[in-house]
Image (tube, helix red, strand yellow):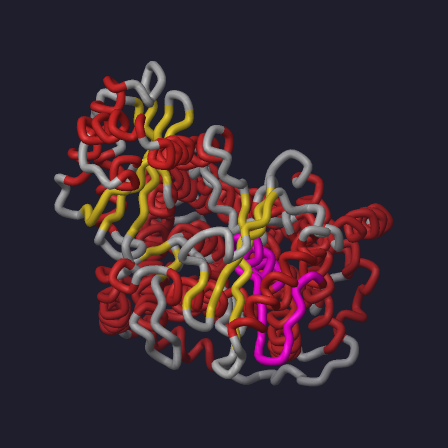
C-alpha cells in the first residue's frame, strides 16, 4: 500500500507544480447574452478581444515637448512588439490626454486570462525616465496580478497556518511523531489533488482561485481526518495490539470519516448546478480533494501507522495526566444539568449575530480585489478618475447591438432604431443614449436622412457621415450605448438590463456591458443555488439517517447548521461590509455565501458525525441517553476542539492575504467552524440530546430504547 502511494505521490507532484501555469481569469465566465454580444463586437465591429491600457504620467515641472517625445518614443519601440494586434497612441484620438496624464492602448486577439506571457514580454518596452512614467493596467494585467497575488497569498497562509497547526497537534497528542503525521497527510493530499486537477486543464478553463481553494479545503480536511484516526488509534493502542488497534480504528473513526467525507463531497457537488466557471472549478477541485483526503485517511494513513506501530508515542513532550477528572467531563456535566439555560444562551448569541445579514450587499470581485499596493490597481483607479467625466464616473454603460433583417443603413431600419432609442430615453434611469444620431448631431432618423441628403453636395460632411456609419453600422447591425445614472454594481441597473433585454423593439437586440455581465452571473447563482441547497439538505439528511438510524438527529444537525451559517454571514457583514475590527469597508464577494455554505455545511458534519458516533457507541452499550451523551462529549471534546482549532488556523490564515474575496472566504470559513465547534457541538447538541432523551434514537418501527450490548 505504501509503495503504491509513494509512486502516486511522486507522479502527481510533478504535475502539481505545473498547475499555476495553466490557471487564468477570475472564473466568472458564463455562456449567455453578454458573451454573445461581446463576440459580435469582436467579429463584426472589429473590437479587440483584450486591451491593455498604458497610463502615462509626468511631473508638473516636465515640459510638454519632452513628455510628447517620451510617449512617441514608447510607441516607436512598441512597433517591434509582435504579440499586439494593434496600437493606439494618445495622439491618434481626442480625449486621451488630460493635464499631467495620457493613455494609450495595446490590443490583442487573445483572451485576457491567457496573456501572462505577453505581459511579461511587454514590460521591457516600457521605460520610465526622470519625471516621466508609464504603467500598465486593464483586465489582462489585473488578471495576471490576481494570479500572482493568489500564489503569494497561498505561500503566506501556509507559512502562518502550518507552524500553528503543528503546535495545536502537539497539544492534542503530546508527542512530536503523532503531531507530525497529520501534516504529512495534509501535504500528500494537496499535492495529489493539485496534480490530478492539472489534467482537467486540458478539457476546461481553470480559475486562479483553485490555488487557494484546494489547499484551504485539503489541508484543513485531511489534517482533520488524520487527527480523528490517530486519536482513536492511540486510544485503542493502550489495550490492544497494533493490528487490532488499526482494525478497530478503521471500523469506528474510519467509518465516521467515510460518512463525513460523503457529506462534504455532496455539499460541494451542489455547486455543479451553477454554470459559471468558478463554481464548476471549486466543485471540481473540492470534490477531488475530499475524495483524496478520505482515501488517504483510510488507506495510506493506516499503512503508515502499521509501519510506525507503537513508535507513534515516541518523543512525547506533554504526558497525559492519569486518574484526574477531565475538565471536559465537568463541562459536559454542566451542560447536561442546565440544558434549557444553555440552549437559550446559545440561541440568543446566534440570533444576535444573524441580524446584519439583512444588509448584506453582494458584488462580483473586480479591480478592488487586488491589494492597494499593486500598480495595476492604482493605475486603473487613476485612469478612471482622470478620463471618465466626473459627473458620470459612477454611471453604468450598457452596450446594445440592434440587428435588422436587411442593411441597417436603410431608411426603414433607421426609423426602427430611432423608436428603440426613444424607448431607452424614456426610462427614468437613463441619463443619455449614444448612437449614430447623436454622433451626427441629430435627434431622429428623419433628421439624419435629411442631413445625409444635404451632405451630398458637401464632400467633407459626407465623408464624416460615412466614417460615422463605418463606426456605428456593420451590415445588418448597429451599435448603441445607453448610460444609466444608477451607480456601479447597482441592483437597479441589474434589474433595468434584465427587464429591457426582454422587451420588443421591432429589431433583434443584444445587450452587453459590465452590468449585463453582473446580471447574468447574479441570476444564474440565485436561480440555480436553491437546487444545490435542496440536494445538500436532502442528501445530508439521508446520509445521517442511515449512519445513526435516527430521524431527529439529522433534522437537528441540518437546522443547527443553517443557524450557524446564518450567524457566520452576519459576522462577516459586520467585519467587512461595515468595516469593523480594522477592516476597510468592502462589499461581500458574490461567491462567499455559496462557497461557505457548500464547504462548511459538509465540513461541520465532521464534528457532528464524530460526536454522535461516540454517543451512539455508548448508548448502544448502556441504553442511557444522558450517560452516553456525557461520555461521548467527554471523550470527543478535546479532539473536536483540536480539529476545529486546526481548521480555523488553516482557513483563518487567509485573513492575512491581500486578495479580498479569498480573505473574506478564509475568515468566513474560520468563523463558521468556530461557531460550529463551540456553540453548536459543545452546547446546543448536548442540550438538545438531554431534552429529547431516548426520542433522539427513534427510527421507523424501532423503539426509543436501544438494546444494551452484551459485553464480551
Q: Residue at x 83, y 60 (%)?
A: 307
Q: Which is nearer the eye, 463 or 348?
A: 463
Give x and y (percent) for residue 162: 65, 72
Residue 579 in magenta stretch: no
Residue 137 in magenta stretch: yes
Do we see residue 697 in this rendering? yes
Give x and y (percent) for residue 610: 51, 58
Image quadrant containing the C terminus: bottom right
Q: Which is nearer the eye, 661 or 25?
A: 25
Does residue 438 appear to the left or right of 548 in the view shown?
Answer: left
Does residue 214 appear to the left or right of 672 in the view shown?
Answer: right
User: Given the current orientation, which residue lies at the most extreme top position?
Assistant: 406
Q: Which is nearer the eye, 205 or 311?
A: 205
Q: Quadrant of residue 482?
A: top left
Q: Residue at x 64, y 72 (%)?
A: 128
Q: Residue at x 22, y 25 (%)?
A: 505
Give x and y (percent) for residue 327: 47, 81
Q: Which is nearer the eye, 382 or 546?
A: 382
Asked if 565 appears above or below 372 in the picture, the reply is above
User: Given the current orientation, which residue lies at the most extreme front position?
Assistant: 457
Do we see residue 698 in this rendering? no
Give x and y (percent) for residue 88: 54, 50
Q: Residue at x 47, y 28 (%)?
A: 44
Q: Which contiguous range is marked in magenta? A: 125-148
- Count of labels in the image: 0
Asked if 303 appears above or below 583 in the picture, the reply is above
Amino acid at each position: 500500500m505504501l509503495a503504491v502511494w509513494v509512486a502516486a505521490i511522486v507522479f502527481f507532484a510533478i504535475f502539481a507544480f505545473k498547475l499555476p501555469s495553466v490557471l487564468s481569469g477570475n472564473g466568472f465566465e458564463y455562456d449567455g447574452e453578454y458573451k454573445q454580444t461581446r463576440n459580435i463586437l469582436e467579429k463584426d465591429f472589429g473590437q479587440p478581444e483584450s486591451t491593455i491600457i498604458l497610463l502615462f504620467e509626468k511631473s508638473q515641472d516636465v515640459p510638454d515637448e519632452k513628455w510628447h517625445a517620451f510617449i512617441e518614443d514608447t510607441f516607436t519601440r512598441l512597433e517591434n512588439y509582435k504579440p499586439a494586434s494593434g496600437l493606439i497612441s494618445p495622439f491618434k484620438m481626442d480625449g486621451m490626454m488630460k493635464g499631467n496624464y495620457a493613455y494609450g492602448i495595446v490590443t490583442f486577439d487573445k483572451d485576457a486570462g491567457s496573456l501572462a506571457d505577453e505581459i511579461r514580454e511587454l514590460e521591457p518596452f516600457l521605460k520610465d525616465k526622470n519625471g516621466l512614467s508609464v504603467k500598465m493596467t486593464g483586465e489582462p494585467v489585473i488578471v495576471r496580478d490576481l494570479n500572482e497575488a493568489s500564489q503569494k497569498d497561498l505561500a503566506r497562509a501556509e507559512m502562518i497556518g502550518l507552524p500553528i497547526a503543528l503546535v495545536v497537534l502537539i497539544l492534542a497528542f503530546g508527542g512530536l511523531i503523532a503531531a507530525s503525521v497529520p501534516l504529512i497527510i495534509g501535504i500528500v493530499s494537496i499535492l495529489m489533488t493539485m496534480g490530478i486537477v492539472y489534467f482537467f486543464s486540458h478539457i476546461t478553463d481553470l480559475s486562479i482561485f483553485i490555488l487557494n481553494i484546494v489547499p484551504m479545503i485539503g489541508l484543513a480536511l485531511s489534517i482533520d481526518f488524520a487527527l480523528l484516526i490517530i486519536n482513536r488509534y492511540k486510544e485503542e493502542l493502550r489495550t490492544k495490539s497494533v493490528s487490532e488497534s488499526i482494525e478497530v480504528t478503521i471500523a469506528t473513526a474510519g467509518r465516521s470519516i467515510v460518512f463525513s467525507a460523503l457529506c462534504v463531497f455532496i455539499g460541494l457537488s451542489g455547486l455543479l448546478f451553477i454554470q459559471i466557471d468558478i463554481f464548476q472549478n471549486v466543485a471540481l477541485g473540492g470534490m477531488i480533494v475530499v475524495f483524496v483526503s478520505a482515501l488517504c485517511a483510510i488507506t495510506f494513513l493506516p499503512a503508515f501507522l502499521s509501519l510506525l506501530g507503537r513508535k507513534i508515542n515516541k518523543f512525547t513532550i506533554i504526558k497525559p495526566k492519569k486518574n484526574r477528572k477531565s475538565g471536559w467531563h465537568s463541562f459536559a456535566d454542566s451542560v447536561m444539568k442546565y440544558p434549557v439555560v444553555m440552549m437559550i444562551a446559545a440561541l440568543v448569541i446566534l440570533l444576535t449575530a444573524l441580524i446584519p445579514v439583512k444588509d448584506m450587499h453582494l458584488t462580483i470581485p473586480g479591480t478592488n480585489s487586488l491589494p492597494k499596493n499593486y500598480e495595476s490597481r492604482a493605475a486603473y483607479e487613476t485612469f478612471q478618475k482622470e478620463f471618465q467625466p466626473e459627473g458620470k464616473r459612477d454611471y453604468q454603460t450598457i452596450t446594445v447591438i440592434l440587428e435588422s433583417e436587411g442593411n441597417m443603413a436603410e431608411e426603414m431600419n433607421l426609423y426602427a432604431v430611432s423608436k428603440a432609442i426613444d424607448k431607452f430615453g424614456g426610462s427614468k434611469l437613463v441619463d443619455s443614449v449614444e448612437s449614430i444620431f447623436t454622433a451626427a448631431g441629430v435627434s431622429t432618423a428623419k433628421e439624419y436622412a435629411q442631413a445625409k441628403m444635404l451632405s451630398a453636395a458637401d464632400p467633407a460632411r459626407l465623408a464624416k457621415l460615412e466614417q460615422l456609419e463605418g463606426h456605428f453600422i456593420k451590415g445588418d447591425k448597429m451599435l448603441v450605448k445607453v448610460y444609466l445614472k444608477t451607480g456601479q454594481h447597482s441592483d437597479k441597473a441589474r434589474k433595468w438590463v434584465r427587464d429591457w433585454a426582454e422587451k420588443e423593439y421591432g429589431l433583434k437586440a443584444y445587450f452587453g456591458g459590465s452590468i449585463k455581465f453582473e446580471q447574468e452571473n447574479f441570476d444564474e447563482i440565485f436561480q440555480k443555488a436553491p437546487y444545490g441547497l435542496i440536494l445538500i439538505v436532502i442528501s445530508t439528511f439521508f446520509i445521517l439517517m442511515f449512519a445513526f438510524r435516527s430521524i431527529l438527529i439529522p433534522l437537528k444537525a441540518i437546522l443547527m447548521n443553517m443557524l450557524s451559517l446564518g450567524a457566520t454571514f452576519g459576522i462577516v457583514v459586520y467585519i467587512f461590509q461595515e468595516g469593523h475590527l480594522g477592516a476597510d469597508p468592502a462589499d461581500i464577494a458574490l461567491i462567499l455565501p455559496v462557497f461557505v455554505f457548500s464547504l462548511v455545511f459538509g465540513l461541520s458534519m465532521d464534528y457532528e458525525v464524530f460526536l454522535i458516533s461516540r454517543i451512539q457507541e455508548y448508548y448502544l452499550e448502556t441504553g442511557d441517553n444522558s450517560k452516553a451523551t456525557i461520555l461521548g462529549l467527554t471523550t470527543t471534546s478535546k479532539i473536536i476542539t483540536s480539529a476545529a482549532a486546526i481548521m480555523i488556523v488553516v482557513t483563518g490564515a487567509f485573513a492575512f492575504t491581500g486578495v479580498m474575496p479569498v480573505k473574506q472566504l478564509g475568515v468566513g470559513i474560520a468563523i463558521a467552524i468556530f461557531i460550529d465547534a463551540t456553540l453548536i457541538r459543545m452546547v446546543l447538541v448536548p442540550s438538545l440530546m438531554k431534552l429529547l432523551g431516548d426520542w433522539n434514537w427513534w427510527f421507523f418501527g424501532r423503539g426509543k430504547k436501544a438494546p444494551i450490548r452484551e459485553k464480551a
